Image (tube, rainbow, N blue to C red):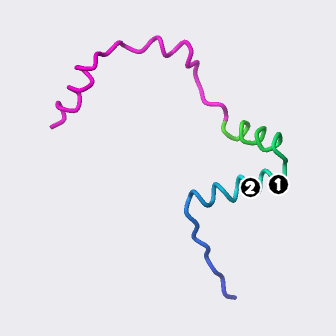
Amino acid sequence: MNATINLLKNSEIQRVGTQALLEALGPVGMVRYLEEHDGGGSGDYTKEKYLQPEISIDEILGMGQEEK
């Protein structure tokens, strides 16, 4: 038995997979599937974004210098 391996780029796999989902499920079904598959993330960004420490531009720029 001769098997051929088709090596696609990740972008091509995503394009073909998205097209297959769209054709099989329709636009609404595709979005519902993707939302279910993604898991919706975790945490509460709206609350957590205010818990981040305030950092100045100078501190941010200095972070790269510390590693050298």
In magenta stretch: residue 22: no
Q: Secondary structure at mark 2?
A: helix
Q: Amino acid at mark 1?
A: Glu
Left or right: 40 as drawn, with respect to 56? right
Query: Could you tell me if the residues under marks 1 and 2 are in contact, i.e. CB atoms within 8 Å?
Result: yes
Crowd band around label 2 with a 10 angstrom C-alpha radius: few (<14), some (14–19), many (20+)? some
Determine the residue positioned at 55% across, 19% down. 45
What is the distance, in whole Å, between disc 1 and disc 2 at their CAs? 6 Å
Q: How packed is label 1: few (under 14 Cα within 10 Å), some, or many (20 or more)?
A: few
Q: What span is in magenta?
A: 39-68
Name above or below for residue 31 compared with residue 42: below
- Would you name the residue on which mark 2 appears? 19
Q: Is residue 62 above or below residue 30?
A: above
The N terminus: image quadrant: bottom right
Q: For residue 64: magenta? A: yes
- Quadrant into which the C terminus falls: top left
Q: Secondary structure at mark 1?
A: helix
Q: Position of residue 65 (x, y in %)?
A: 17, 32
In this picture, is 58 found above or below 5? above
**What residue is disc 1 on?**
23
In the rendered image, residue 4, in percent from the top left (x then y), is placed at 64, 80
